[in-house]
Amino acid sequence: MDNKREKIIEIKNVKQFFKTNGAVIKAIDDVTFHIYKGETFGLVGESGSGKSTTGRTIIRLYDATEGEVLFKGENVHGKKSRADLKRFNRRMQMIFQDPYASLNPRMTVADIIAEGIDIHGLATSKADRMKRVYELLETVGLNREHANRYPHEFSGGQRQRIGIARALAVEPEFIIADEPISALDVSIQAQVVNLLKKLQKERGLTYLFIAHDLSMVKYISDRIGVMYHGKIVELAESEELYKSPIHPYTQSLLSAIPLPDPDYERNRKRVVYDPAQHNYGSEEPSMREICPNHWVLCSEAEYRKYQEIHS
């Protein structure tokens, strides 16, 4: 079945290295995965794992040090004409983590949302421009009266809705949501995630959803990649990953999720991940398929052990 599905994004052996004070930081180290058209791919990990850098490299906010990023078979990186870049920018959009910092405080909501419409010449007239803005405001659960206000007049959840409307304005096919709910109150987080799910269904969108909250990622994602120190250590369908986590780091992340169950919480055992438990002295680990569509970064010896446990 997977062979027949269209891969809208393909990340192949991507490395993203930064130099700081003479040292080389391996933010992404040989990452490979793909995202199917119409799905939500969740990317999770702790701060500094490389997940946000991965998103920014895909959308070309950073140039990849090595490797390829393909959007519908076309390389995003390398030399591109201004017209090519404009076309990519329209088809791929980003929703940022901080709804306070990502909106220009000097611009009205209408101008923020219409920025992409103006750049790409999508409106036929001023009236058409405002019609589009009003429609987008209503699409994200706001109303047309909000168009002439400024960002400081809105709550965090409302600002994130404005950011979503801005991303939708150019009618993209693929959206990177970079920790879009982490700066919001818990009561608002579910509203924003439900809005993203609704928009995906209505518009046939494809998402890369980046977060450190595994419970929310499970709720929105079809498949999940777990990142640790610049590498993907486990990749599987959402239900499978939660039901049968294999990599010790994934197990540690899942063991940290609290549940609204006092008995469970009293007996919950935290798994502490220790990278020293892996013996990679003579062999570099690689991604191996333990069971169908469930991949883990491991050595040959670990592979045999994991297969035995999960067969």
Image: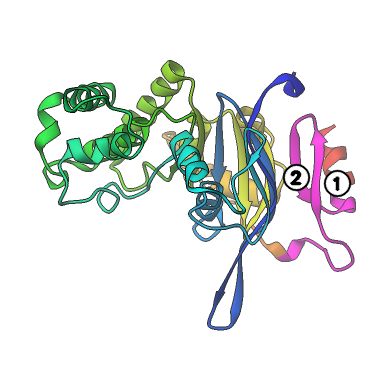
Residue kind at label 2, given as amino acid type: Val
The three-letter code of the residue at mark 1 reads Tyr
- Which quadrant holds residue 293? top right
Q: Give the answer, above or below, for where 281 lies relative to 38.
A: below
Residue at the spot of label 1: 303
The answer to whether residue 175 shows anywhere in this view is no
Q: Percent from the top left, x then y, of residue 28?
A: 62, 58
Tally the marks: 2
Is residue 283 shown above or below 253?
A: below
Say which element carries label 2: strand
Most extreme residue toward the bottom is 22
Q: Which residues are magenta?
A: 276-302
Q: Which of the two residues, 48 or 250, is positioned nearer the viewer here?
A: 48
> Where residue 275 appears, x then y in whole percent?
70, 63
Q: Which quarter of the image is occupied by the C terminus?
A: top right
Question: On the image, which quarter does residue 291 sit in?
Answer: top right
How was this image coloured?
rainbow
Which residue is label 2 attached to?
296
Taking the spot 62% from the left edge, 46% from the top edge, the residue there is 226
User: Quadrant where the N terminus lies?
Assistant: top right
Residue 119 located left or right of residue 177: left
Would residue 297 be counted in the magenta stretch? yes
Which residue sits at x=50%, y=36%? 217
List x then y, in percent, for residue 197: 43, 24
